Amino acid sequence: MSKVALKINIAGRSYPLNVPEAEAEAVTAAAADINKAIELLRKNYAVNDNQDLLAMTALQLLTKAKAEAKPTVIAPNYADIEAALEALRQDLSNVQ
């Protein structure tokens, strides 16, 4: 898988990254979301320290992500068991 060199800007600081090509768009979008959240916090809470804003943003985004995450429920597939039971039933029928 080929990698892409990105220069991501978060809270006024530049971060050079090498990411898989398939993830480049998601990483860029994530950085944009972080910057939007930082600006909203800066406007609403009169906080100007970037470290405080980054910590508050991380807490906010992770809380939101966990609230939206739903556990994956895998429905059991009984077809194999039913087929084996049917074969066993037929075998028992043939013995009698």
Image (cartoon, rainbow, N blue to C red):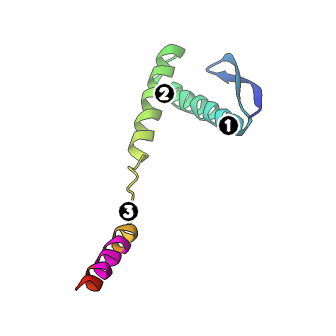
User: Which residue was labeled with disc 2?
Assistant: 57
Q: Are marks 3 and 1 in contact (CB under 8 Å)?
A: no
Q: Is residue 95 above or below residue 46?
A: below
Q: Whole-Å distance between the Cαs marked 1 and 2?
A: 22 Å
Q: Which mark is residue 75?
A: 3
In the image, which residues are magenta?
83-91
Q: CA distance from mark 3 to mark 1?
A: 30 Å
Residue 51 vs residue 90: left or right? right
**Other-residue count near label 2 (Cα within 10 Å), few / some / many at <14 / 14–19 / ≥20:** many
Image vertical order of residue 75 relative to residue 69, above or below: below
| Main secondary structure of the magenta stretch | helix
Q: Mark 2: which amino acid?
A: Thr
> What crowding class fits label 3: few (fewer than 14 Cα within 10 Å), some (14-19), or many (20 or more)?
few
Label 1 close to label 2 by CB (< 8 Å): no
Expressed as whole percent of the image width and height from the top left, the position of residue 70 reads: 40, 50
Extreme-front residue of the structure: 95
| Residue projecting furthest to the left | 96
Count of numbered labels shown in the rendering: 3
Q: Which mark is residue 1?
A: none
Instruction: State which tag comes first along the sequence, 3 or 1.
Output: 1
Q: Is residue 45 above or below residue 86?
A: above
Disc on the earlier residue, 1 or 2: 1
- Rendered image: mark on residue 23: 1
Residue at disc 3, secondary structure: loop
